[in-house]
Image (cartoon, rainbow, N blue to C red):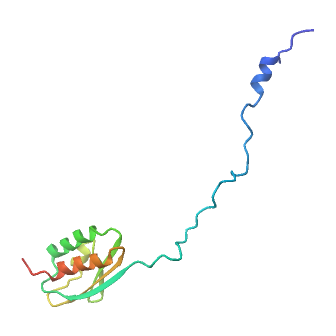
Amino acid sequence: MPASSEGPATAGRLQNTEPPATAEPPATAEPPATAEPPATAEPPARAERAVILPKHLHARPAGLIAQAAARYPQTTIEIVADGRRADARSILAVMALGAVAGSEVLVRTAGAQADGATATVVAILTAAED
């Protein structure tokens, strides 16, 4: 009888040596986390303060406000004057408010450091002209 081409060497190459994959997750797997915050989480802190400007809100104080706002990345800081709103991080938006000396300006903040951010911006707005 002729020798078979499917000898023990060929049969060994065709066999799958990896263990079979299981479709079930391991018994120690934890349930997936939910996207909801815990029930005890407090809403973000908010602060609001109105000030009367002793000077015009021009480029220099607007720049100082934008720099100060950048130090509070987790806090939203908004300045409102005559019904117009501006993101305190934008020098141009703050200048575009057109607030002049004697105008009432409202500083609104929300976030982890709302009180500190409000105090910083109010200090800049109420500082005497250099």
Residue at 20% over, 83% down: 98
| Residue at the limit of the structure toward the left, as seen here | 130
Q: Is residue 4 above or below residue 117?
A: above
Quadrant of the rendered structure where residue 125 is? bottom left
Residue at 14% over, 73% down: 60
How many numbered callouts?
0
**Quadrant the N terminus occupies:** top right
| Residue at the limit of the structure toward the right, as seen here | 1
Quadrant of the rendered structure where residue 44 is? bottom left
**Quadrant the C terminus occupies:** bottom left
Q: Is residue 48 above or below residue 27?
A: below
Q: Which x, y percent locates residue 16?
A: 75, 31
Q: Which x, y percent locates residue 109?
A: 32, 79
Foreground of the two, 130 or 118: 118
Q: Which x, y percent locates residue 115?
A: 30, 79
Q: Is residue 104 left or right of residue 40?
A: left
Residue at 73% over, 46% down: 22
Q: Is residue 122 left or right of residue 127?
A: right
Q: Which x, y percent locates residue 49?
A: 27, 86
Residue at 80% over, 22% down: 11
Foreground of the two, 119 or 88: 119
Q: Is residue 72 above or below residue 21?
A: below
| Residue at the limit of the structure toward the top, as seen here | 1
